[in-house]
Image (cartoon, coloured by chain):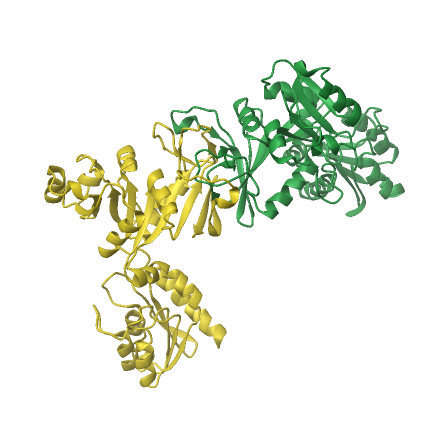
Chain colours: A green, B yellow
């Protein structure tokens, strides 16, 4: 039975994954309805604000749902939100057994969906492939708990750890396959953040250039408000997703007012002109952005490591060597006496992209 | 027929590989004798100065060799060297057909073995799995042609390309699996070379700590003859394999005379006190050493890259970050304006060793 439950739950998790990048800050959720060994309904949460996974699965099953088992990767909701509660729909459709990967992480509602189902006489089984379900929604679970966005580093470095030459040239360190992978990451995370130096140097578009990809929020940390008006960041803001984090000193400056009025750029104002990554993340979290892809440069990445603010990352290593001590390292500013004091990445996994290797980690 | 020939040649190549580390500066060679689809003899060159692969294979086959086919990874020798010519033995044993992976690279003898065989009425086929055979003996082929040892880099770096902290601490960057792999490399190459800073910092034993492993020649590049008498390099020289490359200025110095007389340390003297990697390699080659594992440090590696003297290498990357701009990079001293000027490694392959990744390359 457990084997079969795991089999169907695995399918539900695979369905859930199809929603990646389109549901934030909601979780990815998948559901499968099974009767007499036959799959009669499949669904996943497709879009933020849209119907939940259970709804799609139950509607495919129609009246066959009566007496069936439903597999769902997250506890069915019990409250009226943007949609009616799924637990009610499950009961109404006559489901006999409900298998759940993990409870709702929100302590205010955790277990309430299960209670509704049980009270209605439905057999409920929880924690099937729980680890996998938690891992799939690691962004959602962190954000729901702390209201701090999940911070994921992406950068491309040479074998000697550089992201650019002294003069700022960084084109191209990684190969084409690696660069295509970055577009997927930009789709996956809700926001993308760079420091002002990276913006000035590269004039990046910071969009997700994959078919059907969602553009992320674009965030630049720019204490002195140096972002030029003619840059992509300002000019290509049709989706109103450009956000500048700057010092309060710039409130009401001509540039600030113009960027807001003419280009709909959003602003976050912080005290002083040397920000902490933790305060930046807090502000971004309050805007409802649950996850950030940090793309550089040296100062931003160093700050993230220093404050232990990273949740994970993927560093692409190209088989190139600058051999130049003045080239820009991807992280700097630390002083260590012994190798033991170095930062150790955890949960390391490798992915080969042609002659580049990506090292994935969490912290 | 070709398929079958390749099958047996593959086996011969596998046998040849068993001689790795024990035959230098001779080539690895393997041989298989086949009759009526049955393998009746197997052999490989086991030890420098010992019998050739063909001898072992033919002796196992005994008189069954009459009318059989022999597969050999390198053209059978035609001259009297340390052993009688194998071509003669093949003829004498009544072999009917001889399949050869590649001709002898020495232009003075190439084709002579084949001619002997053909003149004796033996059917000869060459260039079966030639590429594999050339690759297997890349060290031998380079050395025979140029009398310059094959230079292979091994180093362990952090993700930011450092081999030590500013104070010189490097223990341990790589994990245990990677370090075990280094012992294999030390067995494989005939010599191992470090700069004086690495020697002073680590007091390394520079031996091959694997069962049945051959110790390599130990070479330190030490222009000012700073090597301390009480170091492993001097004290543990029972095998007379310690070699110091120093400036001619030190000829006849008390230290030089003592090291030679009391510890049997060998010396190579060069002009001035800033050597070129190319002159170092030339001198080492003249001592009959066909291959060098370069283990560091920064100056030696930088010199090797600068002079394009490396044939290949394996760089172990540990998931650690010093973040310290003053930590020692594995290579430095270059000045580049654009990323395009960086050194690009070729023939890149990756090997995962736990949470370390090794990048193998050639240049």
Residue drawn at 41 percent across, 42 percent down: B177
Q: Is residue B244 visible?
A: yes
Above/below status of A255 relative to B236: above
Kindly indicate the quadrant of the structure image that contains residue B358. Answer: top left
Side (left or right) of B228 relative to B91: left
Front residue of this view, candidates A211 and A200:
A200
Does A174 sit left or right of A78 as displayed?
left
**Which residue is at 48% across, 24% downward?**
A333
Q: Position of residue A347 (x, y in %)?
A: 54, 35
A257 and B238: which one is in front? A257
Q: Is residue A147 visible?
A: no
* Residue at x 68%, y 35% (from the top left corner): A206
Instruction: Identify whether A116 is placed above or below A173.
Output: above
User: In the image, what residue occupies the spot 48% across and 44% down?
Assistant: B342
Quarter of the image holding residue B317? top left
Residue A202 in the image, given as x and y percentages of width and height:
62, 35
Image quadrant assignment for residue A267 = top right
Instruction: Locate residue A194 relative to residue B144 in the image: left or right.
Output: right
Please tell me which residue lies in front, A316 or A66: A316
State the residue in front, B92 or B121: B121
Where is residue B119 shown, x and y percent of the image?
32, 85
């Amino acid at each position: 039975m457990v084997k079969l439950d795991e089999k169907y739950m695995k399918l539900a998790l695979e369905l859930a994954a199809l929603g990646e990048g389109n549901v934030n800050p909601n979780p990815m959720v998948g559901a499968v309805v099974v009767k007499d060994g036959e799959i009669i309904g499949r669904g996943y949460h497709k879009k933020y604000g849209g119907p939940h996974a259970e709804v799609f699965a139950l509607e495919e099953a129609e009246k066959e749902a009566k007496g069936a088992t439903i597999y769902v990767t997250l506890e069915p909701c019990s409250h009226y939100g943007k949609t009616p509660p799924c637990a009610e729909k499950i009961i109404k459709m006559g489901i006999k057994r409900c298998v759940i990967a993990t409870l709702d992480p929100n302590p205010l509602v955790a277990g309430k969906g299960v209670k509704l189902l049980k009270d209605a006489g439905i057999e409920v089984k929880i924690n099937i492939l729980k680890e996998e379900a938690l891992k799939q929604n690691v962004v959602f679970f962190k954000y729901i708990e702390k209201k701090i966005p999940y911070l994921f580093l992406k950068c491309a470095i040479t074998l000697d750890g550089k992201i650019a030459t002294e003069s700022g040239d960084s084109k191209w360190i990684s190969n084409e396959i690696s660069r295509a992978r970055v577009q997927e990451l930009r789709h996956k995370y809700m926001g993308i953040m760079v420091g002002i130096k990276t913006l000035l140097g590269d004039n990046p578009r910071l969009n997700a250039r994959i078919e059907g990809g969602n553009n992320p929020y674009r965030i630049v940390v720019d204490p002195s408000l140096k972002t030029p008006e003619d840059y992509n960041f300002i000019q290509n803001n049709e989706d109103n997703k450009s956000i500048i984090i700057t010092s309060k000193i710039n409130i009401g400056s001509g540039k600030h007012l113009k960027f807001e009025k003419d280009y709909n750029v959003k602003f976050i104002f912080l005290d002083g002109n040397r920000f902490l990554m933790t305060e930046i993340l807090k502000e971004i979290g309050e805007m409802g952005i649950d996850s950030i892809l940090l793309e550089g440069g040296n100062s931003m990445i160093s700050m993230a490591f220093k404050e232990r603010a990273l949740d994970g990352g993927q560093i692409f290593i190209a088989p190139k060597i600058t051999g130049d001590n003045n080239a820009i390292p991807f992280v700097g500013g630390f002083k260590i006496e012994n190798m033991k004091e170095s930062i150790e990445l955890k949960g390391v996994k490798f992915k080969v992209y042609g002659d580049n290797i990506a090292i994935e980690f969490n912290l």
